[in-house]
Image (spheres, rainbow, N blue to C red):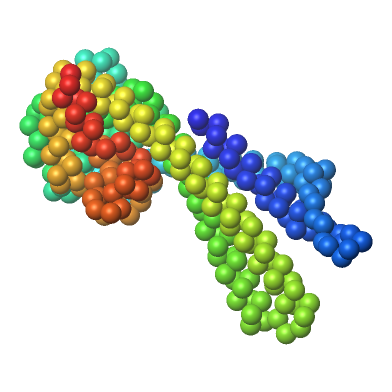
Amino acid sequence: MLILFPVIILGMIWVFLAVLSYLGNGYYDDYGNQIRHVDFAQVNYYFLHSLPWVVGGVAIWFAIAYFSNAAMVRRAVGARPLERKENPRIYNIVENLCMTCGMEMPKINVVDDEQLNAFASGIDQNSYTVTVTTGLANRLTDDELAGVIGHELTHIRNHDTRLLITSIIFVGIVSSLMSVSSRMMNNVMVFGRYNSSDRDGRGTGLSLILIMIVALVCMAIAYFFTLLTRFAISRKREYMADAGGAELCGNPLALASALRKISNDPGLQDTGRDDIAQLFIVHPQSLTSGIGSFFTSLFSTHPPTEERIQILEQF
């Protein structure tokens, strides 16, 4: 599924070049009808020549985001390291669970938020981190807290955090390109309206606007498909982490109870970053109700919390 991300990006670039070829190649038949066609040789030529630049640019962008993700996540949620002396209870629970499953202990961060939430992050042993809110630490019982931390440790054990960070970066790349295309189209429209005094100028402006529209549509399609891929990856991993967390703590009902408490008062709602929020054990957006609940559920990175609770209670 990860291979789909670069495939989608490269595929939309080829489609963009094909559409430009279709719009730029045409002739009039004997009846005066304009006939347009795609010059596939020309499209493939430009695609192959642009390929090294696209792959190189995406690779550099990806590398920077990949290796700076720990600092990015920490700043986004306002987390800080949790010292053992500050909360030995959490440290003891994490240590015991790590000893149970034979894994090295990750870093522990805390967010000063009286509401409840938690998440795991990181791409390797040096950056693996479990982050909890102060509300989660203060309002859950030991068994409930063990279930939540077991869930997050399972994400790390299954390398889910690395997988999700990768999907977040690819979606972010497409989203940023779409935003740049939108701004460029807006600038071209302003330029064409106020700075073109002759017919050729207006024609150039209209041509650039058409190119930007095609680019924006292609980026929007790519963004849609990368989101679908990210949703599929994230949802499956949440079910697996619930099962692993329940097995690790030995008390599925405790994890179900913790999920119910978190869903009633989810924290980290002010993050302002939906890509980061997909790491949370409960995504606040997935709890909306009303007329938009169906669409929210359809495009949510998390399965319905009630469904997760019901599955845990069947153990």
Horizontal and vertical percent for residue 91? 16, 29
Question: Horizontally, is 63 left or right of 254 in the view?
Answer: right
Q: Is residue 294 visible?
A: yes
Which of 277/220 is in front?
220
Q: Quadrant of residue 57?
A: top right
Question: Horizontally, is 192 left or right of 225 in the view?
Answer: right
Q: Is residue 91 visible?
A: no
Which of 12/314 is in front?
314
Q: Which residue is located at x 42 percent, y 34 percent? A: 232
Horizontal and vertical percent for residue 276? 35, 45
Quadrant housing the C terminus: top left
Q: Which residue reaches farthest bottom?
A: 197
Q: Which residue is located at x 23 percent, y 31 percent? A: 308
Which of 46/209 is in front?
209
Q: Which residue reaches farthest front?
A: 31
Height in image: 97 above or below 191? above
Q: Quadrant of residue 126?
A: top left
Q: Which residue is located at x 25 percent, y 50 percent? A: 288
Number of numbered discs overlaid on the protein picture: 0
Horizontal and vertical percent for residue 174? 53, 48
Q: Which residue is located at x 20 percent, y 36 percent? A: 306
Height in image: 161 above or below 184? above
Q: Quadrant of residue 254?
A: top left
Which of 126/16 is in front?
16
